Image (spheres, rainbow, N blue to C red):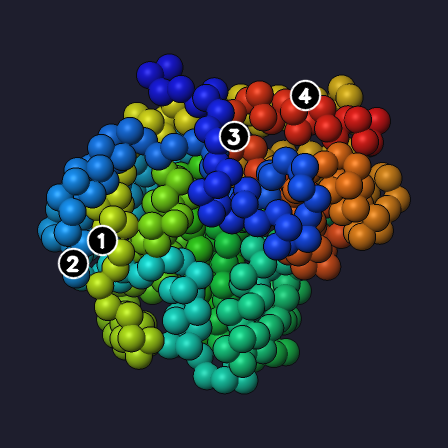
């Protein structure tokens, strides 16, 4: 490989949320952090070079995106997600967006919160599919909306959608907005085009606005293809960012695709009300650079991560047979089922932290449906992942 993903980079002492807040988060000092969804790999060197150039210039005044920025975003989703890439982690059809349809924001969670305020009123119902990325709960409740859940169905180690319950919950609660996680975090499902069409038919029938969080769309594994929900419903709001793909979360940059003129006007108005205007200077530079120059790095990274997933799959099958790995179709977050140990979530979490000396994300963080699970971030050098697996074996074998 051109890029070295085996190098272990010391992240301690950098104010890293993942590594440097052990005591603040109530964890033992000697845990190995494998939790929050950022990677332990430096960003692509081509992106770092552009950032270094901006830093060397030395002035960080108010900055706005030029035409080249929009072209980079547009071309990434148009060229990487075409018919010729189906089966290699792509959408079924190229997704095309224009400059005026792009709404920039400092991050997807911020943008989703703004969208909830823009498209619904206090007391309106918002639906999510659980277990799911935990900030979804907060941005609904903290904005005085009613949280409605459509639990995913877990059977034989796989997750599916209960469409009957989905429509019933919409009708019973007069749901106004559906927050879709696609690909799904934490269960790793890549929703098929047929599944997305069925969701859309129900939402269209009941006038439900759909916001699709597609931040993990660049990490779809062999044999699966991501379909952008914007292809199914041109009026849906699609939330994207280079942050997960290129490990740029701290630079706070995201792009929402909003084709509907009225929804776009409402969203921009809500963002304006927050007082936020120009984005992080280095975030703008990094986003354009990543989408322009990062394809080769990402290709090699995905090969490496699939190797990490293979390691976990084989390890738990051979050495931890009571642990079941949900086959990941997407993301670098592995969802492990410890139910056969018969532990409460509190007991399981304690054995993970105090026994195995690992800092993972306990399953109930994502909702009560996550009981008995742990989410493991495998976006790290293979030697680190092997250490984590050995720690698990030492505690649970």
Query: x, y percentage for residue 290?
Result: 27, 38
Q: Which residue is mark 3?
A: 380
Q: Could one spot residue 152 in this view of the protein?
A: no
What is the CA distance from the residue labelled 2 to the residue labelled 4? 51 Å
Whether the residues at callouts 3 and 4 have beta carbons within 8 Å, the answer is: no
Whether the residues at callouts 3 and 1 have beta carbons within 8 Å, the answer is: no
Q: Give the mark nearer the N terminus: 2 vs 3.
A: 2
Query: Horizontal placement of 147 versus 315: left or right?
Result: left
Q: Give the mark nearer the N terminus: 2 vs 4.
A: 2
Query: Horizontal placement of 217 versus 32: left or right?
Result: left
As drawn, the residue found furthest toward the front would be 13
> In the image, which is nearer the foreground, mark 2 or mark 3?
2
Q: Could one spot residue 371 in this view of the protein?
A: yes
Q: Nearer the viewer, residue 252 or 171?
A: 252
What is the CA distance from the residue labelled 1 to the residue labelled 4? 43 Å
Q: Which residue is mark 4?
A: 314
Whether the residues at callouts 2 and 1 have beta carbons within 8 Å, the answer is: yes
What secondary structure is marked by label 3? loop
* Residue appearing at x 29%, y 75% in the figure: 275
**Depicted 123 relative to depicted 78: above or below:** below
Q: Nearer the viewer, residue 321 or 52?
A: 52
Query: x, y percentage for residue 57?
Result: 13, 44
What is the CA distance from the residue labelled 3 to the residue labelled 1? 28 Å
Q: Which residue is mark 1?
A: 281
Q: Give the mark nearer the N terminus: 2 vs 1.
A: 2
Q: Nearer the viewer, residue 351 or 239?
A: 351
Residue 61, numbered circle: 2
* Residue appearing at x 61%, y 71% in the figure: 148
> In the image, which is nearer the foreground, mark 3 or mark 4?
3
């Amino acid at each position: 490989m051109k890029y070295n993903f085996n190098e272990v980079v010391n992240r301690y002492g950098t104010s890293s949320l993942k590594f440097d807040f052990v005591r603040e988060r109530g964890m033992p000092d000697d845990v190995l952090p494998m939790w929050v969804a950022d990677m332990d790999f430096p960003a692509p060197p081509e992106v770092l070079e552009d950032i270094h150039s901006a830093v060397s210039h030395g002035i960080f005044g108010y900055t706005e995106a030029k035409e080249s920025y929009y072209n980079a975003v547009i071309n990434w989703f148009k060229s990487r997600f075409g018919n010729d890439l189906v089966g290699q982690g792509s959408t079924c059809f190229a997704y095309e967006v224009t400059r005026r349809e792009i709404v920039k924001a400092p991050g997807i969670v911020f943008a989703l919160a703004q969208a909830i305020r823009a498209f619904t009123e206090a007391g309106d119902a918002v639906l999510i599919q659980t277990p799911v990325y935990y900030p979804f709960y907060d941005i609904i409740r903290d904005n005085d909306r009613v949280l409605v859940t459509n639990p995913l169905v877990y059977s034989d180690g796989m997750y599916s959608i209960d469409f009957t319950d989905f429509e019933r919950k919409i009708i019973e609660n007069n749901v106004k907005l559906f927050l879709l996680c696609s690909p799904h975090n934490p269960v790793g499902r890549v929703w098929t085009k047929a599944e997305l069409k069925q969701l859309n038919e129900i939402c269209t029938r009941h006038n439900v606005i759909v916001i699709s969080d597609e931040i993990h769309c660049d990490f779809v594994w062999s044999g699966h293809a991501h379909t952008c929900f914007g292809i199914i419903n041109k009026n849906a709001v699609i939330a994207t960012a280079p942050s997960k793909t290129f490990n740029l979360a701290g630079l706070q940059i995201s792009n929402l695709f909003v084709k509907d003129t009225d929804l776009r006007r409402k969203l921009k108005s809500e963002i304006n009300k927050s007082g936020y205007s120009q984005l992080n200077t280095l975030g703008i530079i990094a986003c354009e650079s990543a989408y322009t120059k990062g394809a080769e790095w990402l290709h090699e990274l995905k090969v490496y991560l699939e190797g990490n997933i293979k390691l976990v799959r084989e390890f738990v099958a051979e050495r931890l047979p009571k642990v079941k790995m949900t086959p990941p179709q997407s993301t670098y977050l592995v969802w492990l089922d410890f139910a056969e140990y018969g532990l409460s979530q509190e007991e399981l979490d304690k054995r993970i932290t105090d026994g195995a000396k690992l800092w993972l994300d306990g399953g109930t963080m994502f909702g009560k449906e996550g009981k008995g699970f742990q989410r493991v971030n495998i976006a790290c050098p293979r030697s680190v992942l092997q250490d984590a697996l050995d720690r698990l074996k030492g505690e649970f074998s």
